[in-house]
Amino acid sequence: MNKVVLITGGSSGIGKSIGEFLHQKGFIVYGTSRNPEKIINSIFPLLTLDVRNNESIQSAIAKVIATSGRLDILINNAGVGITGPLEEIPTQEIKNNFETNFFGPIEVMKSVLPQMRAQNSGLIINITSIAGYMGLPYRSVYSASKGALELITEALRMEVKSFGIQITNVAPGDFATNIAVGRFHAPLLKGSAYEVPYGNTLKMMNEHVDSGSNPNEMAKAIYAIIQNPNPKIHYKVGVFMQKFSIVLKRILPDKVYEKMLMNHYKL
């Protein structure tokens, strides 16, 4: 029996690559988008879903179950970037980021769990970020939102294991996607105390995305996790040094690691 997969944020970037790869492997794939009518080249159906709107979440999941009779895998991929000096990021933008990156995935998980419990089976894969393992300068809010999702996953995994449901995190590094376009960028304010260091860091961040890995690497990693009957709690996908930075944080004294990051960002 072909497994049924729901991917939030499945119209572009990593979500689209995962959906296309799984579709080609014979999975029944549903993607989501806030405006699916604007997407004309998807090879799998796209449902209307905004992770900030609980009604749209419930509606999309109901359509999947009504059409396919079950839901085997949820890939919580929808997310948005945000950059800027914390002092200069409007509080509403911080809240908006957490609505998409943290509270949204929680609501989607809460909405699929009753069906997965009834099936006595299911897999939830939360797409987080290597940035969620450390506080990165001028990405403080993004790091915090993704780190929070990592911890929620750890806790929920233990709560639902007895129902036959598996939950795991996959933290990507930099991938060549359009995430930089959709980010909220706090404006570079002329005369700001942060103007030069933030400007330099923002340029470096955009260069990292432009030269990032192929999103198909994430698709292959997700497929391998799905094939594993007992997935790990955490996965990291990306170039060696990005993954190794997490190891360094574990083994280095805090101030040494902080100095290493500051040197990297030339702060």
Image: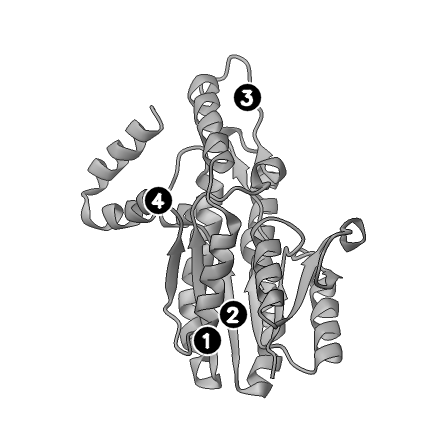
- Mark 1 to mark 3 CA distance (whole Å): 43 Å
- Mark 2 to mark 4 CA distance (whole Å): 24 Å
**Residue where numbered disc 1 is placed:** 166
Q: Residue at x 43, y 54 (%)?
A: 171
- Mark 3 to mark 4 CA distance (whole Å): 27 Å
Of residues 118 and 77, which is closer to you in this image? Answer: 77
Mark sitting on residue 124: 2
Residue 64 locus on image (x, y percent): 71, 73
**Residue where numbered disc 3 is placed:** 188
Q: Amino acid at mark 1?
A: Gln
Q: Amino acid at mark 2?
A: Ile
Question: Which tag is nearer the camera, tag 3 or tag 4?
Answer: 4
For the residues bearing labels 4 and 1, Cβ distance under 8 angstroms: no
In primary-sequence order, the first of circles 3 and 2 is 2
Mark sitting on residue 242: 4
Q: Regarding mark 1 in the picture, which secondary structure is present there?
A: strand
Relative to 147, residue 207 above or below: above
Q: Residue at x 61, y 72 (%)?
A: 27
